[in-house]
Amino acid sequence: MDWIFLGELTINGALTGLLYSLVAIGLVLIYKSSAVPNLAQGALTMMGAYVVLAFSHNLGWSLWISIPLAVVIMFFVGMGIERVALRRLAGRPIVMILMMTMGLDIFLRGTTLAIWGGTSRSMNLGVSYNPFFVGDMLLSRIHMVGAAVAIALFIGFMVFFRTRMGIRLRAISDDYLASWSVGISVERGVGLSWGLASIVAVATGVIWGEVQGVDQSLSILLLKGLTVAVLGGLDSIFGAIVAGIILGVLESVGSFYLDPIVGGGSRDLIVAGVLILTVMIRPHGLFGRHDIERI
Amino acid sequence: MAQNETRQDDMILSLNSIEVLYDSVLLAIKGVSIEVPRGGMIALLGSNGAGKSTTLKAISGLLKSERGKVSRGEIRFDGNLIGDFSPQDRVAMGICHVIEGRRVFEHLTPDENLDAAAPMSMSRSEMASEKERMYEYFPRLAERKSSQSGYLSGGEQQMLAIARALMTQPRLLMLDEPSLGLAPFLVTEIFGIIQRINKEEGLSVLLVEQNAIAALEIVSHGYLIENGRVVMHDTAEDLKKNSDIQEFYLGGGEGKNFHDIKHYSRRKRWLS
Ligand SMILES: Nc1ncnc2c1ncn2[C@@H]1O[C@H](COP(=O)(O)OP(=O)(O)O)[C@@H](O)[C@H]1O
Ligand SMILES: [Mg+2]
């Protein structure tokens, strides 16, 4: 076996995995503050990418202006989603809210398709496509940038959830009624978490848009993100990072060995296998909280 | 009239013929009127399903999350009508409701539970000294302030729920069955602390209990509510002496089963 090649597979796998973590972090943010798995995170990611392109492509503005503008706009889109679609559902069974996020996913995909059409566009971040050499190993630069963004967001949110606002969001996810009873505005807290997740969606959309182009397929990132989030534990940002790396490496190294045997397409099988096994064996994921039995 | 107004001013809370509807059809309380004097301690007693929690939720505004609404009557806090205010506004005005079942934020530490309840306007140093004050009232919490709240004992969780409510700086504290499921020595300890806070800080307290024996030891007056109606209102001393109350709360062992109470309330209505 060629050790350099295996190392390359592993490291590029880990980097790709950290890009999945980006999607997962968005999911965890909303779950951590409202206990809802947001099935629209993939579509939000795609929308984030399109909003950036609307400025950088259609208006020809620099990315340094387009991205911050998209961040602000998407923050309010996220808050708006809570206000318009979710607020009236607060306190209803989680299934209803889950169905609502699924409806949102379909709605956002339909809207972006209607506005921007189905052809793939490029993000043109300006990151070189030449590989980066570590010894004899070839690494992808855009993946390295994306991994750095994932780590930066991870650190940022770890700090945020220790602040007073962050603690309130965690309280909300624990118990809506108890939160209301001590004067916490559950509505505003959940809105904030959607706003933050939508900001993460912009970062994710920019990176993934650069990797694979901006089109409808960005919304399918939800499946990878959800798998990573479930494996890490739906409420653990640290879990999202670790699980992203694990899934990325499994996918990259696993498919290298499996593809010749099954004739290709084993990546999806590996993702499906990880999701199914996690739910069966360890439903709260690697670092997720256990539900505490009431005494 | 003038006398009536001074009386109004003495009351921090007054409910006038409150009716509550759930799901627009189920009439859960039917014309409840109660008053809590400023700095006083009042008990609202009654059996399971009588409408005690519903009454508290009408006051704190938590009804809205359960598709309930006040369909008649008025609620005044400090003389002002509060019916249109959100739960957050009512907390900011000084009403705090410790809900039934000691629902602490289980995945947060006790310290974080207190942080979460501190108003955003409270400064860091103020918050720290408020928390110190809570740990002084509830030394058991201080010992466990960094463990996960979901793993505290029932008594500790109840203390945490009360301390958390006190972090909102209430002037009226409403407690929904704090003694439920707790050993008698813990009930005594917790009620003792509530009494101490009432005396030292003039905090007004509305205590909801099925455990009439314990509650009547610390309050000045009590209301008895049955089937959504107030059926009796008297001083704690007289309620304790009342032969009917003694019959089903104080006599014959536990003696607070539902059948007895039904029997009692029927008799009471014939008598009055
Ligand atoms: N969320 C709700 N929806 C419909 N009915 C309710 C709800 N909560 C309470 N009730 C009904 O209202 C009545 C009073 O309940 P409650 O106030 O909880 O009584 P208590 O606290 O005295 O045990 C009961 O008949 C109960 O079934
Ligand atoms: Mg009750």
Image (cartoon, rainbow, N blue to C red):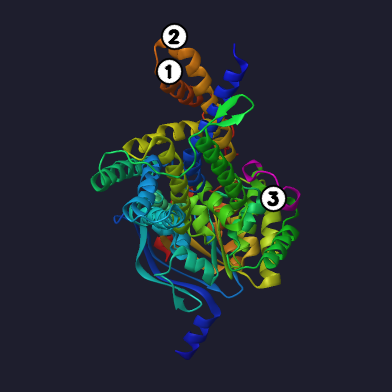
Q: Chain of mark 3?
A: B
Where disc 3 sits, the SS reads: helix
Asked whether A164 or A24 is in front, the reply is A24
Q: Which residue has dot 1 on it?
A: A266
- From what the image shows, is residue B83 above or below residue A117? below
Asked whether A107 or A186 is in front, the reply is A107
Q: Which residue has dot 3 on it?
A: B186
Label 1 crowd bin: few (<14), some (14–19), many (20+), radius 10 Å = many
Q: Amino acid at mark 2?
A: Ile
Q: Which residues are magenta?
A: B141-151
Whole-percent x and y of residue A235? 53, 40
Confirm whether the magenta stretch covers residue A10.
no
How many numbered marks have been drawn onto this rendered protein structure?
A: 3
In the rendered image, which quarter is residue A104 located in?
top left
Whole-percent x and y of residue A247? 52, 27
Q: Which residue has dot 2 on it?
A: A261
